[in-house]
Image (cartoon, helix red, strand yellow):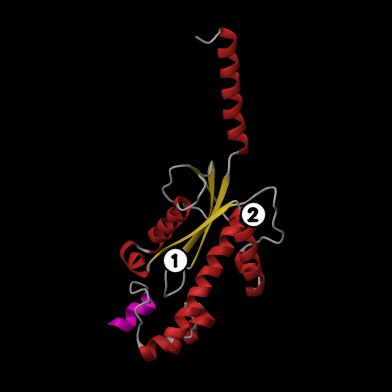
Amino acid sequence: MPSKKSSKADSRTSEQAAFAWDVVGLIAGVDEAGRGPLAGPVVAAAVILDDMNPIKGLNDSKKLSPLRREKLYDEIRAKALCCSVAQASVEEIDQLNILQATLLAMRRAVEGLRLKPHKVLVDGNRLPVLGVRAEAIVRGDATVPAISAASILAKVTRDRWCRELDLQYPQYGFAGHKGYGTAEHLAALSAHGACPEHRKTFAPVARVLV
């Protein structure tokens, strides 16, 4: 039977361990790409950065050039403690609505992390349903490095998907407008109708399906 002295020591050790974890706990940043476009999935990413292996130049992905995003994408994948990219499909967007599909993609990204975060920081003002503590941060992609990293992974992943879709459906110009409702895209929709990857519940697409 352990002595009172060892029991007190064990208790002290476990309290210190719990306190240390609460302070140092892993923080995951989460962001999405593709809420506004008329086609394709919405993509979300979750990233836990390594404080001992910092990445310079992280910022809101929209403020970075495509070349810079691609370089940072590779650096994030190489240096982050772990990261996860997930999506909600066009069918899920049409079934759930874009907000709920976005939250679903975010939840999938967090659940796909190899390490469980102590807290999740999400860009914006809405939170997905998660099994860990979470906080929504407006404009977090410009102020929180882990969210910036997530925004880059999500944006690059979706842009690559659009370039692949462009090879399949070159008449729409996906490589250029990335699915957004530009004049070029709307003209292509009017001329060719919708392809299977268009979001049928989005008004410009719904109009050509009538």
Residue drawn at x 42%, y 84% is 168
Image: magenta residue range: 203-210
Q: Is residue 171 left or right of 153 when viewed as pictured? A: left
Of the 4 image quadrants, the one containing the C terminus is bottom left
Q: Nearer the viewer, residue 15 or 99?
A: 15
Kind of residue at disc 1: Val
Relative to 21, say whether 84 is above or below. Answer: below
The residue identified by callout 2 is: 145
Q: Earlier in the sequence, mark 2 or mark 1?
A: 1
Identity of the residue drawn at 35% across and 86% down: 193
Residue with the mark numbered 1: 42
Residue 200 locus on image (x, y percent): 33, 74
- Indicate the position of residue 37 as horizontal and vertical percent values: 46, 73
Q: Mark 2 to mark 1: distance in Å?
A: 21 Å
Amino acid type, residue under disc 2 in the picture: Pro
x, y percent for residue 194: 35, 83
Queried whether the magenta region covers residue 205, the answer comes back as: yes
Instruction: In the displayed orientation, state which residue is furthest to the front.
Output: 1
Quadrant of the image occupied by residue 94 = bottom left
CB contact under 8 Å: marks 2 and 1: no
* Main SS of residues in magenta: helix
For the question of whether residue 187 can be seen, the reply is: no
Residue name at image x 59 percent, y 34 percent: 21
Viewer-side residue, 11 vs 3: 3
> Is 95 one of the magenta-colored residues?
no
- Residue at disc 2, secondary structure: helix
* Residue neighbourhood size for the residue with mark 1, other residues' Cα within 10 Å, grouped as few (<14), some (14–19), many (≥20): many
